Amino acid sequence: MQDKPISIKITLLGNCGVGKSSIIQRYTSNSFQEDYNSTNGGSYSQKSISIDDTLYQLDIWDTAGQEKYRSLGKNFYKEAYIVILVYDITREDSLEGIKTIWYPDLQQFGEKCKILALVGNKCDRYEEENTVNEEEARAYAKEINANFFIVSAKNGDNIKNLFDKLITLFIEPNFQDKVIQNEIDRKGSVKIAQKKNKEEKSKDKKKKCC
């Protein structure tokens, strides 16, 4: 008998207004709110699912896209195993934001081994308002080794498939081995850096005293 659910930490990143909160709302409650207030700092949602008689608790963090909250972002995704980078298919600047802001920040502050997804939201407006070249987005997803999805939080297109795919990747044994190895490698790198720092300080002291 399983004592408690296995926690899976998921974080969504992207510019303000791309629909991160709406994607989470559609997935967790199968609902959509047309007028959504901007997230301040970050918000938390939870959903429990069962796969092959194993219970999982999804801890889903929605990060604010405004520049004034960017310094808080690392607190929400440094522990995430699954990170979803969201852009709005009707706004070229939102994909550019992924390239220049959110993915670089993730590389700098994300400490866990991650499953990445690049997600273009608002495909319900694809025909009349699309300004983002899908092939360009797909190519970038391939470049950063991210799974690529086109979704609509408004009508629910591909939302469940998005989360199902990423969660399935997470629970694969090979990924769990990679997570463990990543933790070992990271701790080893920290120790090497600390040792090198001590050696450099020791050399500086010797130079000063001579």
Image: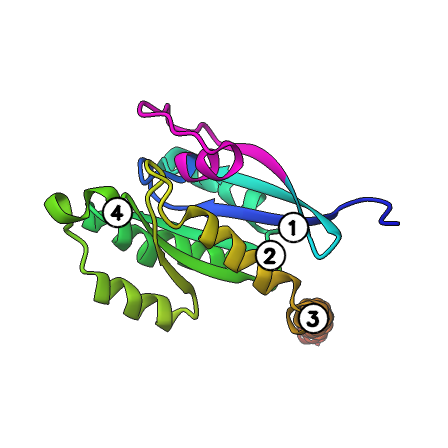
Q: Which residues are magenta?
A: 22-47
Dot 2, how many residues are within 10 Å of its Cα: few (below 14), some (14-19), or many (20+)? many
Which amino acid type is marked by label 3? Pro
Q: Is residue 190 above or below residue 73?
A: below
Which amino acid type is marked by label 1? Ile
Disc 4/disc 3 C-alpha distance (Å): 33 Å
Nearest to N terminus: mark 1 or mark 2: 1
Does residue 110 appear in the picture of this structure? no
Nearest to N terminus: mark 4 or mark 1: 1
**Which residue carries the number 1 mark?**
8
**Which residue carries the number 4 mark?**
123
Which residue occupies 49% across, 40% down?
27
Nearest to N terminus: mark 3 or mark 1: 1
**Which residue carries the number 3 mark?**
173
Which residue occupies 88% across, 49% down?
1
Disc 4/disc 1 C-alpha distance (Å): 27 Å
Which amino acid type is marked by label 2? Tyr
Indicate the position of residue 16 as horizontal and vertical percent values: 33, 37
Indicate the position of residue 120 as horizontal and vertical percent values: 31, 52
Indicate the position of residue 141 as horizontal and vertical percent values: 36, 66
Classify mark 2: helix, strand or loop: loop
Q: Kindly check if marks 1 and 2 are in contact, taking CB atoms under 8 A apart as contact.
A: yes
Classify mark 3: helix, strand or loop: helix
Disc 3/disc 1 C-alpha distance (Å): 14 Å
**Which residue carries the number 2 mark?**
81
